[in-house]
Image: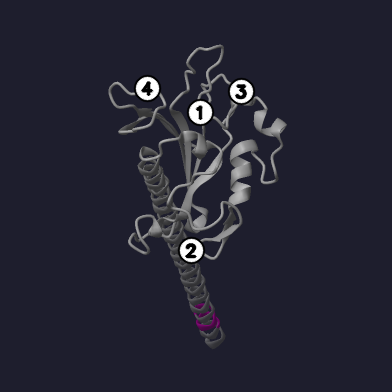
Amino acid sequence: MWPRVISILNDNAMHGRGERGVALVVTLLTMMLMMALASALVLITSSETIIAANFRSGHEAFYAADAIFERVLADLRVSVDWNTVLDGSTQSTFADGPPSGSRPLADGSSIDLAQLTNIANCRKPTACSDADISATTAERPWGVNNPRWLPYAYGRLADSVGVNTVRSPFYVVAFVGDDPSENDGNPTRDGLSVGGLPNPGLGILSIRAEAFGPRNAHRAIEATVARMEPPGAAPGGGGITDLRVLSWREID
């Protein structure tokens, strides 16, 4: 009898230890699942924070590019001779030095104005040849009348209307170029007559505005603007009263 009782007690003890072991395994699995869910939640939250910050920086870059575009319009309104703008002898009053060299950004990185000019003109950071600039491409299909972009206005957006008067970490650059609708084959002059006929691009300029900021934020826009002469003034004779935006688009 006693051996039977002892055997039953031993079986019950072993069964109890088995239940406790199963409970321990279930507890560990539950903890692991909760840890995985918590890690996934942290990852999703961090990713959403980064996405939101990048989205915000992208929007700020777009508005910064538009702001330097408006700043350029203000200078062009009082520029009588756009030929001096196109040949680089006249620049905006908003420029933080020569139109070349490295410029630091707020996040510690930098940009190079010469490289940016080359990329705008021939899609590469190294120097562009005349053949490169005049090449007919999908983006620049006008051949010898392709705009030859020149840095016109550039600097920290925070200094665009006075030192540290605007709260912005963005660096902005605006290029000017001849209107590609011209047919004179000379992108450094504003609408030379051809065969004694008025040039369709007389008094029209192209503007390319770009903004660079934190998290590699970058936006660029291109626009075409025309000057509106005072009543009775000869075309190109000066006395600019206003500008009209003929086209405007965001570019990659």
- Residue plotted at (38% across, 31% down): 238
Instruction: From the image, give the main secondary structure of the stretch colored magenta.
Output: helix
| Towards the viewer: 97 or 131 | 97
Q: Are marks 2 and 4 in contact (CB under 8 Å)?
A: no
Magenta-colored span: 7-12
Which amino acid, mark 4?
Ala
* Residue occupied by mark 3: 185
Q: Earlier in the sequence, mark 2 or mark 1?
A: 2
Which amino acid, mark 1?
Asp
Give the SS element for disc 3: loop
Which amino acid, mark 3?
Gly
Q: Earlier in the sequence, mark 3 or mark 1?
A: 3
Q: Is 105 within the magenta?
A: no
Give the vertical position of 173 relative to 241 (above or below): below
* Residue occupied by mark 1: 190
Q: Earlier in the sequence, mark 1 or mark 4?
A: 1
Q: Is 10 within the magenta?
A: yes
Q: Earlier in the sequence, mark 2 or mark 4?
A: 2
Whether residue 172 is visible, yes or no, is no
Give the vertical position of 145 relative to 119 (above or below): above
Callout 3: 10 Å neighbours few (<14), some, many (20+)? some
| Towards the viewer: 7 or 134 | 134
Which amino acid, mark 2?
Ala
Kindly report which numbered mark, 2 or 4, lies closer to the viewer in this rendering: 4
- Residue plotted at (53% across, 88% down): 2
Q: CA distance from mark 2 to mark 4?
A: 46 Å
Identify the disc placed on residue 234. 4
